[in-house]
Image (cartoon, coloured by chain):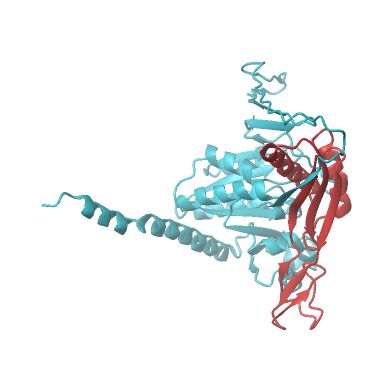
Chain colours: A cyan, B red
Amino acid sequence: MCTTCGCGPDEVMIDGEHSHHEHEHVHADGTTHSHAHQHDHGHVAGAAHEHVHEDPQAHSHRHSYAPAHAHAPGVGTRRMVQIEQDILSKNNAYAAQNRQRLADRGIFALNLVSSPGSGKTTLLVKTIELLKGRQRVAVIEGDQQTSQDAERIRATGAPAIQINTGKGCHLDAHMVGHAMGKLELPDDSLLMIENVGNLVCPAAFDLGEAHKVVILSVTEGEDKPIKYPDMFRAATLMLMNKCDLLPHLTFSVRRAIEFARRVNPGIEVIEVSATTGEGMDAWLAWLERGASAAAERKRAAVEAPKPPIAELEAHLSPAS
Amino acid sequence: MHEMSLAEGVLQLIEDAARQQEFARVTTVWLEIGQLSGVEIEAMKFCFDAVTRDSIADGARLEIIALPGTGWCMKCAMTVPMAEVFGECPQCGSHQMQVTSGTEMRVKELEVA
């Protein structure tokens, strides 16, 4: 369990289904053992919870025996093994795959991070409504429990998929890759990934997004950027939400921006209110700039190899 | 920050190496942890013991190699030591700093049997 926030890695569900997971263990005697299971859940309110294993014996065991160990303990058998790998390298490899898939399709993906209660989902709903007819949007929602947020998004007409992380305190690139496969992502669209409300752990986990966008509502402390510096350092843009409430608060926008720039001198800031619509034009313009740049990069990449192919075809055409 | 996930990442790298290089037991693990990585060393040790229980690294000693933080001060136009990610330049007091090293979290090497 995470000593900071009490999370654990188990129990990940994507739209109510366990993702197919494979476990591999290396036992103390050097044998490896791997098994995979697929659970199907049919939940009816109040009904008994049942796991259906297609084949209850479907565990595959793969044993690879290390050479026999007949040595006396500690006698001449010890050696050093160089690893030199980043602890997050597995996640980063999945993130790189996601990023490539997104680039190939010209999709502009954002990872939205904030504390719980900053108004992320309301802001997202408002954004989708304002972009209707201008920009196609799909959403991946991350929460520990319930699919309420995905339902709120689907009510706008945008496709949405819910990842429930169970005890987990953040989304990782592997979960997001699975969710991307299940979601209808149109080419040249916008993918919004709403991370679990948490200003700590999601900072370290790259999902393959173009940018992290941190949302700070003005009902929170203006010193949050220096209390949770990793997140504000990882973000490209800070949205200051609930700005319509400023007249009733002592929150200083200037000080909040100063704190954010102290941890991240290059961070961009847009002040918005999802309720009154204030500042939304600037936010939508930022989104559309990013989305058209992603679509343009895809188009350039697709068109780039064409001249050599035409040349090749000219070479291959029978000489007359 | 999320030492449990990190400890699991360490164990995965160890298990991958065990399959490739055929060893059955890990006795010591060396991690390089940057001063600005946000990793709490005591939490990391606690979590490492928890996740390696009944694995090939059960009972292994965890050695942490702390790497110092450095940053580029835009005002001084030079590399200076940094103690915190939002730290100030020890030369001029400016916060216009970019971290250049100290965010590492790496498995460096293992002693295996």
Residue at 57%, 46% in the rendered image: A139
How far from the left and from the top, in percent, is residue A198? 75, 51
**Image position of A71 with respect to B27: above or below:** above
Q: Is residue A281 left or right of residue A45?
A: left
Q: How many labels does the image show?
A: 0
Instruction: Give the quadrant of residue A154.
Output: top right
Q: In this view, does A219 lie to the left or right of A107?
A: right
Residue B78 visible at all: yes
Q: Which of A158 and A316 is in front in this view?
A: A316
How far from the left and from the top, in percent, is residue A307? 30, 59
**Image position of A297 with respect to A102: above or below:** below
Could you tell me which quadrant the C terminus of chain B lies in? top right
Instruction: Give the quadrant of residue B89.
Output: bottom right
How far from the left and from the top, in percent, is residue A13? 66, 34
**Image position of A255 with respect to A166: above or below:** below
Q: In this view, does A83 lie to the left or right of A55?
A: right
Instruction: Give the quadrant of residue A231.
Output: bottom right
Residue A86 visible at all: no
Residue at 35%, 56% in the rendered image: A305
How far from the left and from the top, in percent, is residue A224? 78, 63
